[in-house]
């Protein structure tokens, strides 16, 4: 078998060289960050996606406190370590929920984590990336409903317009958090009036199972100490019980009505245009989309879209990188 060593060694050297070249090739990173999950993708200069994945959810609001900043650094450090096995990130386009456009903290954190100049990093609200993944500027409206909810429009001049998306303390009606909050509110109002009513409610039983118990202290700890994304996941229990529980179905129908309001607000301001619905809320139960269609003007075309905003962001970052070369 000794005569095979030179042959095998040449392949080993070639593999090592290819691996070394791969680790140094310039890449563009796209980030689509929401409160529940962060999705990322890496693209080459010719806009080919070479890797993608997920990380913990994050929001721009985390920059307001020390603990949040620590979490952001950890998430970005993990992304940088993962990306380094595929090549050298030279450009980043990030869409981050809650970003207002006037903060430099997030671009600085990304620059430090990836050892890049700030000029190589572009950060916007996540909904802008999602819109550009579905429509060309001026072509339509996007209603995005995940943990929160918002409608977006980018006009032909590139100006961003919004309806909703004010955050869970003010609104975000029709999103996952809103659905979960409505369900918990209705559940405990029923308990106020008729203790142990939850035993006759399919929705309540599913909610309590996810939370970990039917005692108020358990609900209180969950609602006031868990993340917005964790609370939003309770919407799954609402959807799962909708076919057997009229109250759960009503909450989902009201969610569709609230999402329609966002689309109507855009039509009132800029005229009738096609509307695309994206985000995970549309996957919860058909009643949400049915209610949305019902409450939109009949002249408005509605379609559902599976948004791949992290891929779009990666391709935008690749174009950004080519312009700098």
Image (cartoon, helix red, strand yellow):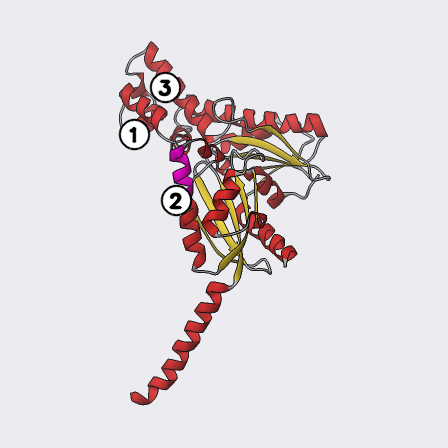
User: Where is mark 3, residue-wise?
Assistant: 187
User: Where is mark 2, residue-wise?
Assistant: 74
Percent position (x, y) of residue 276? 61, 38
Magenta stretch bounds = 66-73
Magenta span contains residue 243:
no
- Estimate how packed mark 1 is, as few (under 14), some (14 to 19) or many (20 or more) residues with alpha carbons within 10 Å: few
Are the residues tagged 2 and 1 within 8 Å (C-beta)? no
The residue lying at 60 percent from left, 32 percent from top is 151
Above-or-below relation of 18 to 180:
below
User: Where is mark 1, residue-wise?
Assistant: 209
Percent position (x, y) of residue 196? 28, 16
Question: Quadrant location of residue 140?
Answer: top right
N-term-proximal mark, 3 vs 2: 2
Q: Is residue 90 visible?
A: yes
N-term-proximal mark, 1 vs 3: 3
Magenta span contains residue 67:
yes
Q: Secondary structure at mark 1?
A: helix
Q: Secondary structure at mark 2?
A: helix
The residues tagged by marks 2 and 1 sit, at their Cα atoms, a distance apart of 31 Å
- Mark 2 or 1: in front is 2
């Amino acid at each position: 078998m000794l005569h095979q060593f030179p042959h095998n060694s040449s392949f080993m050297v070639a593999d090592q060289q290819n691996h070394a070249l791969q680790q140094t090739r310039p890449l563009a990173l796209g980030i689509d960050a929401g409160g529940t999950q962060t999705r990322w993708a890496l693209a080459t200069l010719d806009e080919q996606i070479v890797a993608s994945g997920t990380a913990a959810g994050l929001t721009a609001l985390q920059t307001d406190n020390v603990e949040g900043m620590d979490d952001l650094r950890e998430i970005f450090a993990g992304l940088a370590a993962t990306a380094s096995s595929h090549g050298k990130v030279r450009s980043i386009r990030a869409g981050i929920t809650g970003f207002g456009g006037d903060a430099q903290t997030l671009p600085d954190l990304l620059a430090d984590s990836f050892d890049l100049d700030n000029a190589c990093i572009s950060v916007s609200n996540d909904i802008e990336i999602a819109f550009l993944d579905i429509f060309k500027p001026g072509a339509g409206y996007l209603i995005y409903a995940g943990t929160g909810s918002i409608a977006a429009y980018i006009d032909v001049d590139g100006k961003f317009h919004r309806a909703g998306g004010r955050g869970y303390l003010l609104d975000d009606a029709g999103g996952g958090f809103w659905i979960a909050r409505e369900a918990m509110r209705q559940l405990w109002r029923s308990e106020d009036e008729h203790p142990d009513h939850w035993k006759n409610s399919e929705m309540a039983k599913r909610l309590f199972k996810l939370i970990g118990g039917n005692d108020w202290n358990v609900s209180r700890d969950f609602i006031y100490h868990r993340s917005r994304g964790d609370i939003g996941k309770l919407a799954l229990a609402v959807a799962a019980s909708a076919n057997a529980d009229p109250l759960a179905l009503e909450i989902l129908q009201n969610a569709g009505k609230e999402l329609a309001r966002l689309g109507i607000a855009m039509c009132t301001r800029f005229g009738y245009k096609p509307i695309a619905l994206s985000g995970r809320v549309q996957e919860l139960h058909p009643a949400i989309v049915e209610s949305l269609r019902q409450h939109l003007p009949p002249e408005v075309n509605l379609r559902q879209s599976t948004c791949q905003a992290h891929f779009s962001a990666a391709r935008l970052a690749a174009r950004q990188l080519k312009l700098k070369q």
